[in-house]
Amino acid sequence: MTLQQAIEALGRALIGASADIPKLIEEQLGEEVQIVELSSPKAWQFLLSHQLVSGNEDDGYTASPLLNDIVISLLADQVRRKTAPDVADWLDDLRRAADQLRLAERNDAHADVVRYRGQVRQLVLSMTAGLTSETLELQYNLASNFGTCATLDEKLIENRYLVKRTDNLTKKLALINNPLLLEIAGENSFLITQLYHRLPPKLQECRQEMLDAIPRLENMLFKFQEHSEQAKRLLAMERYLNSGQLLSFEPSEEQLANSCFNSSDQGESSFYAHSNVDFYGPHQEYYVDIVRSMRKPRELFELVSKIRDEGPAVLSRGGHEEEVTPIESLYTTKYYDFLRYAKRIGEPVALLDFWSVQAQDLSANAFLYYVDNQLEHLPELAVERHTRSGGRLSGNTIICNLSLNIPTHHRGEAGEGD
Amino acid sequence: MEMHKATLTALQQGQFICQYTQPELHRYLSDEANRDSVDRDFTPFGYEVASVADEVYYLAYANPLESVSANKIRAQFEQYRDLMSPVVSFLGLLQRAGKKTEARNVGDRFQFSDLLEPLVNNPAHGQQLDKLVNRVPFKTTKTHPAEKLQAVLDGMVKLGFLVSLNKTQAVYVFTGKIEHFHKALTFIFEAEDIPLGDDGDQGTQQELL
C-alpha cells in the first residue's frame, strides 16, 4: 500500500465512522461508550486496527488521544477562523444551557436532556479548542518572530494587537474560576464532571501560557520598535551625510565614558602594555589563579594576619564566605615577608634575589607578577621596575625584576605586621 | 577552565563576542555566573565585561574617566565617526537593494549573488557601489561589479560587522557588532541633532528615481 493509498483508506474510515466518532469525543470521560449499532463496521474495524479507537462491542469504545487531538485541532481551526471565545458571552451561554439541562432533567424530558448535554459539551469543547488555538498561535508568532508578516510595520501592528488581545483574554479568563463553575454546575453530576473536572485544568494551562507569553511579546515589540527607529535613523544619517554635512560634535569625557565607545578594541598590545606581564609566558596557568585571588592591600594585610594568628582563614569575597586557598596564603605570606625583608634591609632589594633565597617554592614569574600588582596599590613605596621589551607580544614592555626600597624610617603598611 | 581562558584571551584581544563569531564563548558569557567570574578576573587590570543587549560582549574600561582610558575611548569614538559615512552608505544600499524597510541586525543574512543582481541591474545602485569602493575601508581598484562588491564585503568582514557563513554559496551574516554600531550611530545621531524626518521612505524613493 502506498502512502497515498493509506491516507485515502484513513479518509474513507473517518467518513464511514463520522456519525459514531462524535459520541466518543463528546463523552470523553475516559470511560467506554456503548455504541449499539455502528454506522460502518468496516470503517470502525479500520480505526480499531490502527488504534485510533480502542475497546470492543461488549465493554464499549474510547477514542485514542491522537483522535482526540485531531478533533480538537479541527475545532480549534474552526474557532480561530471565526472568533475566539468571548468569555462573557460564553459564560451566559453556559449558564443558560446548564439551567435548561436542569429543567429538562426535572421534567424527565429525555430528548431535551440529550440536547442540552450536547450544548454544554460543545461549549466546553469550543472554549478549550479556542484557547488551544490562541496559545498555539501565540507560540507560533513568538517562535517565528511574526514570520507570516512581510514587513516590519506589519509585525509591529500584529504584535501590538496580540499583546492587547492576550492581555485582555487572560484578565477575562481569570473570571472563570472554580467557585463560579461550581455555582453553575450546582449538584448536577454531569455538569460537575464537565465544568469542574475537565475545564479548569485546560483553562489554567492556557492562561499560564498566555501570561508567560505577554512579557516575551512585549520584549519582541520593543525590539521591533527599536529596529524601526534604527532604520529611520540610518536613512536620515545617510541623507545628512550625502548632503555634504560633516559630523563635528565633540562629546565630553563624561558623555563618552557612559557611551558604547567605552570598549577596549585596541587589541592585545595595549592590554599587555598596561599590565606589564608576559601573559603568554611559561607560567600563564598561575596568572588566572593569582588574578582571581588578588585583594586590596588592607584586605591582604588582614588576611595575612589572620593566617598567621589563626591558620587558614575564612573571608568574605563578593558577598560569599569562602576559605582562603593555599596558593593565596602562600603568595600573600611571601609578599609580606618581602616587604618586611626590604624594610629590615633599609636599601633597595631586588625581588628575584629575595625569591632565590626565600621563595623558590613559588614560580618566579608568578611571584614577580603578584608582587608588582600589589605594589601598585602602595604608590608611596619606592619601586623600580626592570623591564625588557618584546617577547611574543612585540612592542610591549615586560617586567623582569623589581627593586623595592623601604628606608628604615618609613612608617607604612609594611611595618604593621611586625 | 579552557573555556574561561579562551574567553579571557578573546576579550583581551579586543574581540566582540557574539553567537555568530564565537558561539561557544558567547554561550559561556551568556551565563551570568561565568560572566561575573570573567569580570572578576579583569577587575585588577581596570577592565570589565560590557554588552549590547546580551547580543555581543566586549571589554570596556572600568574607570573610563582615567586619562589613559579616556584617551582610548575618544580614539574609539573618532574611529566610529570616521566609519559612519561608508558603513551607513553600505547599510543603506543593502536595505534598498534588498527592498527592505528595516535596518540590518545581528543574525540577518544575505547571499552574495542576491545582492549582486540588483547592483548590476539597477544603475542607481551601481553608482552607489562605485562611490563605496572609493572610500577607505572598502577601497579597491577592481572594475567588475562582483569584485567591487567583494571588496566592500571583505571590508565589512574585516571591521567585524559581517562573517561569511558559507564560502561556496557566499552567505554572509551580521554579527553582534552591528548592534554596537547601531548604538554608536544613535549616540552620534542624537549628539549631532540630525533631523529624523518622517519622509525616510520618500527620500529613498527619490534617490531610486
Image: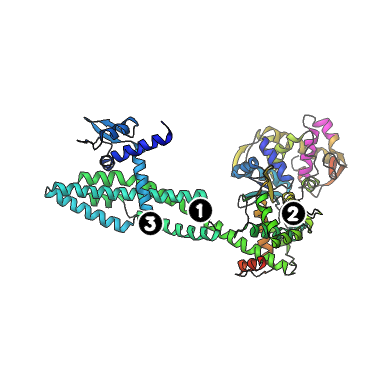
Residue at the (31%, 53%) spot, across then down: A176
Q: Tell me if A274 is positioned left or right of B16 in this view.
A: right
**Quadrant (top left, top right, bottom left, bottom right) of the C terminus of chain B:** bottom right
Q: Secondary structure at mark 3?
A: helix
Chain of the residue displaying label 3: A
Question: Do the residues under discs 3 and 2 have CB atoms within 8 angstroms?
Answer: no
Taking depth in this image into account, of B141 and B28 the one nearest to the observer is: B141
Residue designated by label 1:
A146
Q: State the image quarter where residue A170 is shown.
A: bottom left
Chain of the residue displaying label 2: B
Q: Tell me if A78 is positioned left or right of A412 in this view.
A: left
Chain of the residue displaying label 1: A
**Quadrant (top left, top right, bottom left, bottom right) of the N terminus of chain B:** top right
* Residue found at the far left of this picture: A107
Measured from the top left, where is residue A255 in percent x and y? Answer: 69, 62
Residue type at tag 1: Phe
Measured from the top left, where is residue A357 in percent x and y? Answer: 83, 30
Q: Is residue B9 magenta?
A: no
Question: Do the residues under discs 1 and 3 have CB atoms within 8 angstroms?
Answer: no
The image's mark for residue A171 is 3
Foreground tag (1 vs 3): 1
